[in-house]
Each structure stands twice: as structure tokens, then as C-alpha cells.
């Protein structure tokens, strides 16, 4: 398949701009060509200056914009943001190709090979009964890839948002059986951590116990199949929208919000909850 893709890439530079715009905008090869063209000597000065490090923030930003489109259930926006994210991937691959490190073909080959290798129950002869057995098989295969003595937690990126990182750590540990037997135990642990926070004697202990509470909350969310990051983003958005309603209500009524008493603010907050 890759040899066909390479042939398509070789053909693209000979196409006129008009033909490419009219016929090849839905082609992955066109995107690869366009990015290479931007990076060419007579391409875009800004794109030519970029490095892996300089565009790293954009990769993270585009990923978050994809997540936002998913949270808001906006298919058209999701389509656009996936394109922006794909551009970042192809740009990183182009920069690597120029440094003779790897190219987009190797990226595709790597992920295709990995998909096939990690799904022997689909592309091989392994038989599994359910999703649980799939995860067990997957973890066994990943352990073989990591090699002896390498932790199953080592591949979890430690620069993930802390709450998402907590859930990821717990999910990996649960795959090998290190987990509570039922949700009740998770909730009891959460109650225990809250009590320990109340008993904390200094700031260092409070920080430690508060972290344990958040970790226990992440575990409870995992058990309830709640994406903690998504849940918190939604809660943040609700607070933002409701507080904005309070500010707008104060403007309409000609009353500065900072002059309201706590009781008046509470009343306005309840009004905002009913309206927003």
C-alpha cells in the first residue's frame, strides 16, 4: 500500500495548482505534499523556521481543541479540528524527514504494524470471549514489547494533566488485577481520605491528603466510567456560564456585583442555576 502512496506523492508535484485544488483536496498525499511545499526553499518563511520544539505547543493546543469539539458534540467543528491536528502530525513527520530521521511512511507503517500485532483476535487466530480478555491480551503483548523489568506504568506520559494521569495509572494497574473488588471499597477509601484531611496537622500533610482525595476521586470516576477531565471541564463551563449570567444580571439591574452581600450573591447564583 505504501508504494502506491509514494507513487501518488511523486505525481503530485507535477500537478497544476488548479487540478490539485479541484481533484485532490480529499487526498492524504495532497496534505503531505502541501506541507513539504511549505517547508521548501521557496515555501513559507514561517513554516520553514519551525522545529519540533517550536510547534510542540500547537500540537497540544490542537489536541485540546479536538477534545472541546467532542465535549460540545459539534461534528462540523470536530471535522475541522481533526484536520488541524493531522496537520501538526504531518508537519512533525516532514521535519523529521528533512533531518533524515523518519518519514510519514514510517509513521504509518509503525502504527499499522502495531494495530495488527496488538489485535491477534482480529488479524490472527487468538480467541477471546469479551473486552476484558482483550485488555489482558493487550497488556501481555505490551509487556513483551517493553521487555523484562520495565514497569507497566512507564509508558504513561507524566506530563499529562494530573487528573487524567491518575486515571491512566489506575487503569494500567487494574489490567493486571490491582483493583478494588467493588465500587463500595473505592467510596469507603474516599471517605477515609476525607477524614485524614480533617486530621492533618500542618500544610505539608494537608497537601498530601488532598492529593490522596483527588486520586481516590479519580479512581471512583474510573469505576463509574466517568472521564474525570471531561467531567471537570463541563463543571468549569457550567460555573463560567452561570457566573457570566450573574455579571450580566447585575449590569442589567445597574448594581455592581462586588457590592452584593454573600446572601444576595447566593440568591443570584440560584437564579443563574435555574436559567443556565
Image (tube, rainbow, N blue to C red):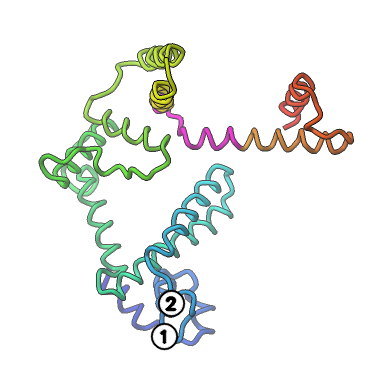
Say if residue 224 shows up in the picture.
no
Which numbered circle lies on residue 161? none
227 versus 200 height, above or below: below
Residue 253 pos. (x, y %): 89, 34
Does residue 169 appear to the left or right of 60 in the view shown?
A: left
User: What is the secondary structure assignment of the residue under circle 2?
Assistant: helix
87 versus 175 height, above or below: below
Quadrant placement of the N terminus: bottom left
Residue 226 pos. (x, y %): 46, 30
Q: Mark 1 sits on what residue?
A: 41
Q: Earlier in the sequence, mark 2 or mark 1?
A: 1
Query: Which residue lies most toward the right here?
Result: 254
Residue 25 pos. (x, y %): 50, 72
Q: What residue sits 23% from the left and 25% below the top?
A: 177
Q: Mark 2 sits on what residue?
A: 48
- For label 1, the crowd category at 10 Å Cα-Cα, with few meaning under 14, some 14 to 19 and many 20 or more, is few
Q: How many marks?
A: 2
- Nearest the viewer among 104 and 62 is 62
Residue 223 belongs to magenta span: yes
Does residue 186 appear to the left or right of 128 in the view shown?
A: right
Does residue 262 appear to the left or right of 103 in the view shown?
A: right
Quadrant placement of the C terminus: top right
Tell me which secondary structure the magenta stretch mostly adopts.
helix
22 versus 14 height, above or below: above
Region rendered in magenta: 222-236
- Nearest the viewer among 51 and 40 is 51
Mark 2 and mark 1: Cα distance apart in space: 8 Å
Q: What residue sits 37% from the left and 83% below the top?
A: 11
Residue 149 pos. (x, y %): 12, 39
Do tag 2 and tag 1 residues touch (Cβ < 8 Å)?
yes
Amino acid at each position: 500500500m505504501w508504494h502506491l502512496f509514494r507513487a501518488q506523492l511523486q505525481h503530485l508535484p507535477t500537478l497544476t495548482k488548479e487540478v490539485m485544488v479541484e481533484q485532490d483536496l480529499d487526498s492524504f498525499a495532497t496534505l503531505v505534499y502541501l506541507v513539504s511545499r511549505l517547508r521548501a526553499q521557496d515555501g513559507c518563511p514561517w513554516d520553514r523556521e519551525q522545529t519540533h520544539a517550536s510547534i510542540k505547543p500547537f500540537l497540544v493546543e490542537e489536541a485540546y481543541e479536538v477534545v472541546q469539539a467532542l465535549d460540545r458534540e459539534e461534528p462540523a467543528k470536530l471535522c475541522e479540528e481533526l484536520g488541524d491536528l493531522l496537520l501538526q502530525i504531518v508537519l512533525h513527520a516532514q521535519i523529521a524527514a528533512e533531518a533524515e530521521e523518519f518519514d510519514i511512511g514510517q509513521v504509518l507503517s509503525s502504527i499499522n504494524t502495531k494495530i495488527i500485532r496488538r489485535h491477534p483476535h482480529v488479524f490472527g487466530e487468538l480467541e477471546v470471549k469479551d473486552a476484558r480478555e482483550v485488555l489482558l491480551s493487550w497488556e501481555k503483548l505490551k509487556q513483551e514489547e517493553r521487555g523484562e523489568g520495565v514497569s507497566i506504568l512507564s509508558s504513561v506520559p507524566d506530563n499529562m494533566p494530573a487528573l487524567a494521569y491518575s486515571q491512566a495509572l489506575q487503569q494500567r494497574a487494574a489490567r493486571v488485577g490491582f483493583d478494588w473488588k467493588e465500587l463500595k471499597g473505592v467510596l469507603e477509601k474516599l471517605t477515609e481520605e476525607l477524614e485524614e484531611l480533617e486530621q492533618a496537622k500542618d500544610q505539608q500533610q494537608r497537601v498530601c491528603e488532598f492529593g490522596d482525595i483527588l486520586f481516590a476521586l479519580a479512581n471512583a470516576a474510573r469505576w463509574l466510567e466517568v472521564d474525570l477531565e471531561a467531567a471537570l471541564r463541563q463543571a468549569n463551563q457550567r460555573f463560567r456560564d452561570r457566573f457570566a449570567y450573574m455579571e450580566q444580571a447585575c449590569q442589567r439591574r445597574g448594581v455592581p456585583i462586588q457590592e452584593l452581600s454573600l446572601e444576595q450573591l447566593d440568591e443570584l447564583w440560584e437564579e443563574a442555576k435555574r436559567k443556565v
